[in-house]
Amino acid sequence: MLTIVMCDDDIGFLQQLYDRTEEIMQKLGIEYSIKEFDNGRETVAYCRENGADMILADIDMPDKSGFEAIRELQEQQPEVPVIFVSSHEELAYQSFRYNPFQFVSKSEPERLEAVLTTLVKRMGRSRESMIRIETDGGMVDINADRIMYLQSDRNYIIGYDEDEIEVIRFRGILKNVYDALSGAGFIYTHKRYVINCRFIRRFERKKVILDSGKEISGTRNTEMIDEAQRVYGSFMRRRRW
């Protein structure tokens, strides 16, 4: 089930966008749910609480622009694909700073089918790697193929990729995040770190060495280390099969 969120303060166009998107999804044979909003504020509130699989957003809106809404959402859900649908073609270049999947002009609505079809196909290839978890700040999508480890920093949790670049940040408790991710190949070896087994080069009781060369010290808690080794061993056995 794809959750599609769309936002436009032009109610008439919003209905047209809904009808066209519904028609395309039915043609593709995709199960979907569409949530409509006529302002950026409610769009942000809904996505933070419930998450979204894709967002279609207008840019020029009175209470909160599409750019402002997407910027806020990307702080928590940077992986969610965004399609800007706007009559302001002069803003197409400016929209690139928000890394949208595509910009569609309202004067060319026929392009929407090709854009959505391409996006749905791409999402079908990557959805298995996305893990949606509930955190203190709402729903967050974790990309198991991209995030190498998660590190707690006071009230926040930061996710890093294999190049040690921050790719996600959200509010939460690390132990709760681990409980949601342990079945997906993540281990908890230190009170400040949850590590993705896919990026482990070597696992020792006193430290874990990642593919990037980063070393993460192990905890002195033997029960935690035993649990981590069990989860890691189970993950590696499944991977070999």
Image (tube, rainbow, N blue to C red):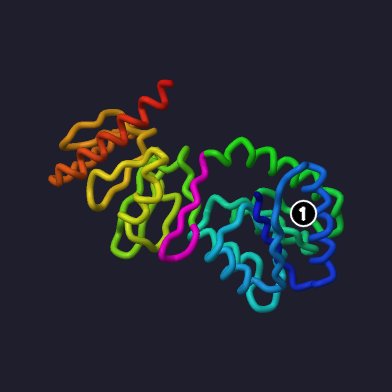
From the image, tell me which residue sits under label 1: 104
Res. 34 image quadrant = bottom right
19 over 238 or under it: above or below: below
Q: Amino acid at mark 1?
A: Val
Whole-percent x, y for residue 6 in the image = 70, 62
Vertical placement of residue 173 versus 131, above or below: below
Majority SS type along the magenta span = strand
Which of the pair 89/183 is nearer the observer? 183
User: Helix, strand, or loop for circle 1?
Assistant: strand
Specify whether 106 is left or right of 230: right
Q: Is residue 104 magenta?
A: no
Residue 200 on image: x %, y %: 32, 32
Residue at 58% of width from left, 38% of height from top? 126
Magenta part of the protein: which range?
A: 129-139
Q: Quadrant of the C terminus?
A: top left
Left or right: 18, with 124 as reference point = right
| Residue 137 magenta-highlighted | yes
Near mark 1 (Cα within 10 A), the count class, few <14, some 14-19 or many ≥20, is many
Please state the horizontal and vertical placement of residue 209, each as a whole percent of the image. 26, 33
Residue farthest left in this picture = 220
Residue found 80% across the figure and 63% down from its top:
87
* Residue lying at 66% horizontally and 57% vertically, measured from the top left: 55
Q: Residue at x 33, y 60 (%)?
A: 173
Residue 33 location, quadrant: bottom right
Q: Residue furthest top?
A: 241
Q: How many numbered tags mark residues here? A: 1
Between residue 233 and residue 168, name the one nearer to us.
233
| Image coordinates for residue 71, horizontal then vertical, percent | 56, 63
Q: Image check: 190 left or right of 31?
A: left
Left/right placement of residue 183 relative to residue 55 reads: left
